[in-house]
Amino acid sequence: MKMQHTVLFMLFIFLPLANVSAQAQTPRSENPDYFIEGGLRYGTALYHPESFDYLKDFRFNSYEMRFGIQTHGKNAWERPLGNPVLGIALRYTDYVDFSDPPLLRRQQRDTLGKNIAVFGYMQAPIVRWGCFTWHYQLGLGAACFTKKNELISVHVNPYVSLQSGFDFRLSRRIDLTVNANFVHASNASLNFPNWGINEIQGIAGVRYHFNNSENPGIKRRELFEKFKPHNALFVTVDPGWLWSRYNNWYYFKTGISAGYERQLIPFLKAGAALEFHITNRLTQTREYQPVYEDGTSYEAPKTLFSSAALAFGDLTFGRFAFSIGVGAYLFRSPADFDLAQAGAYSGTLSEMPWFYEKIGLKVSLGEKQNHYVGASIRAHFPVADYLAFTYGYRFWKF
């Protein structure tokens, strides 16, 4: 991914830390403000510079439906974020190319198929002033492609949606919304090819509120219990699998970690952990493909091992947390081998072979929230290493 796309991604991640909402003191309604929103997206797909040049001229549209609720500061994490909107979205994309020539349009209809995505999202204000709101949005979910194609080779894929835009309140029940949206979908090395698809689109929509609140996002000046930072020690198990581009074998990958976390403020947690990963070959899925140009083959190791130190930050929304981290390898065996990269360096490995990234979602369980489950993608940006399913236990809180 180009540098400007990386900057855009980091901007969305850290916007909560720069919330400068200018909030009018209009009284809020006591009734829950549920809403429904319909929208039309139009834009393009980013193309891989080495292949698929046709994507640079690719134009298509999407349709989406959103359901959401406006928070009012009841929970401690809501107030520092300016009382965000929480919701779920359904998005349908038909990859019909609306550009010329018509021959290309028919070709892409046959190649990429259709996409149905479902994702949860959090939308928080950057500036709120009267009937105008400038917001950012983080979304995470899954997308189902109706056919396997040359970009993504499995039907169901992780789906990330980053968005920023403007809301204009036209009446007590009707809002006009205008947004810019970035989307990434790929299969996290569950199968190949896995180039993924990246979309940049504009969205225009209309939102209907089910109550008559004049300004539902504005909190009252009330006395809230003062937040107290707290700490915890935890352990996790992260099983998953990947398909190696290097030799077309399936591998089972297991991660075990132990670490420390601190809830710094109601919506932000930071921590560090030691991670250990073991990768075992499972079964041959295709006839072995030679790696080298001269046709000679190379027997990939049946077991790989690595250890690493990870630093992470979690955006926490009650029981839910959106996590992003950066890790540094302490030990790798073999040291110069990576399954997802066809045995060669790419992504982060091309410049910093001892670093990786990790992004995912966690959900805390139980009355004391000692247990949590989730999923994450470990990657050498932008090439995915593997998709992990997480179980964690906080065994000591203080």
Image: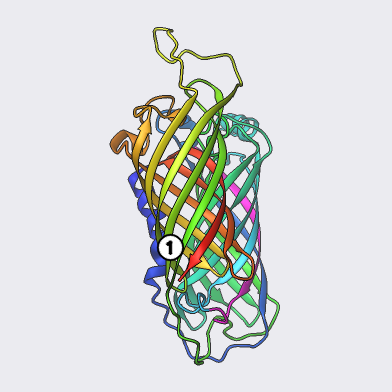
**Three-letter amino acid code of the residue under disc 1:** Glu
Left or right: where 372 falls relative to 163: right
Of residue 327 and residue 233, the one placed in the foreground of this image is 233
Q: Residue furthest right?
A: 210
Residue 105: percent from left, percent from top: 59, 34
Residue 289 seen anywhere in this rendered image of the structure: yes
Q: What residue is at 50 percent from the left and 92 percent from the top?
A: 223
Q: Which residues are magenta?
A: 57-75
Residue 393: percent from left, percent from top: 55, 58
Instruction: Please tell me whether residue 386 belongs to the stretch shown in magenta.
Output: no
According to the image, label 1 marks what residue? Answer: 261
Q: Residue furthest left?
A: 351
Residue 238: percent from left, percent from top: 54, 45
- Quadrant of image for the N terminus: top left
- Quadrant of image for the C terminus: bottom left
Q: What residue is at 41 percent from the left and 24 percent from the top?
A: 343
Q: What residue is at 54 percent from the left and 42 percent from the top?
A: 387
Q: Secondary structure at mark 1?
A: strand
Residue 148: percent from left, percent from top: 64, 32
